[in-house]
Amino acid sequence: MTVGYTPAGKRIVKKGSGKTKTEAKEKLKEILRDHEDGLALAPTNYTVADAVTYWLLHGLKGRAPRTVALYRDFAEQHVIPSLGARKLRDLSVEDIDKWLAKKAATLSTRTLKLLHGILNRSIKNAMVREKVKRNVVDLCEVPAGRSGRRSKALTLPQAESVLIAAEQADLRIRAYIVLSLLTGARTEELRELAWPYVVAFHAERHAWLPVSDVGWEHTEFAIYVWRSVRKGGDTKTEKSRRTLKLPQRCVDVLKALWKAQKADRQAASEAGRLGKDLVFCTKTGTAMSAGNTRRDFRKVIAAAGLDAEEWTPREMRHSFVSLLSDSGMPIENISRLVGHTNTVVTETVYRQQIRPVIQDGATAMDAIFKVESEA
């Protein structure tokens, strides 16, 4: 049966076949009904695996190789084996709900969201290519998965022990730990921090200038947290791009690191391999890897008397939030310091580290409705 014409004027023909004339007519009616409802335009044998595979090949342009590899691994391990054989037009909300519920027994909530995102974007990509008209994944909610490793924060005595242990460590990791704990910068941001982004306030010129140009004979210093090791060098969000004034302990350790690196930096400059002029780098000037940072960090943690396997560098940032919260700093100020878009992000991600007590209301009511305390 002819159901229309293409832009080139060719007929669009739908066919139904069967062992008998009646069966063929029924098949044709079903195909026409789907066509009129806009349920599926793709061949009836187009599967979920076809949609996911196409998205992995063509829908991840511009992503970092590690990100592409991560998506491919999760798709090949969890999505395609479970749902890949299902015809895309027949995929239902019930199919996805059952699949996610089964995965929730062994995977974390974060991983479930990642799997849901892979399938969701694959089918949206198929919709753009007119392989299917509806996306049932959008109608599904991600269940809570298995409890993952809970992030934690150092107490004040623990933080002081870590700083004392860092004093005996290599200067590079000492500076890294001090800045991470006292500024709350992400590990990916610190590993990309360059000396031109360490600045001092020049009183006479009334401007913030790189210490590489104006030296260390000043009273106020800051770092520009403007880049990270992410692909393209961008920070996690726009609000993550911020300028942080440095505590004196950070200034002292950075000044010591600057002097210690002077010879290596001069040699690298003469050899034309100074590159980004990173603060935290190897002796050859290359960037520190996450693995190298974690290894050196855990040595200091062990020296501080803590279980090294239980702590990661990113928990210095959690500790920063916790210590500020315990000191009474408002959540709005903490949110700006750590570069979050709003306080909701801070409260959600760091809910274990933030003091849950808002005292203003109780204080005001006690002043209004005064009562005598019991003896």
Image: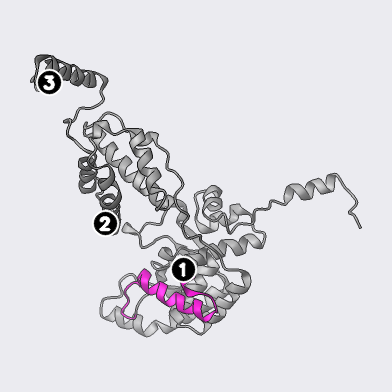
- Disc 2 target residue: 69
Is 94 in front, or is 299?
Answer: 94
Q: Is residue 6 visible?
A: yes
Is 137 in front, or is 201?
Answer: 137
Task: State the extent of the magenta-drawn residues as a range.
Answer: 283-310
Q: Is residue 163 magenta?
A: no
Q: Is residue 77 above or below residue 152?
A: above
How many marks the image carries: the answer is 3
Q: CA distance from mark 2 to mark 1?
A: 23 Å
Q: Is residue 217 visible?
A: no
Q: Is residue 22 above or below residue 201?
A: above
Q: Residues within 10 Å of mark 1 (few under 14, many from 20)?
A: some
Q: Position of residue 124 (x, y in %)?
A: 29, 37
Q: Residue at the location (50% across, 56% down)?
A: 339
- Disc 1 target residue: 312
Q: Is residue 348 above or below residue 227?
A: above
- Disc 3 target residue: 16
Q: CA distance from mark 3 to mark 2?
A: 42 Å
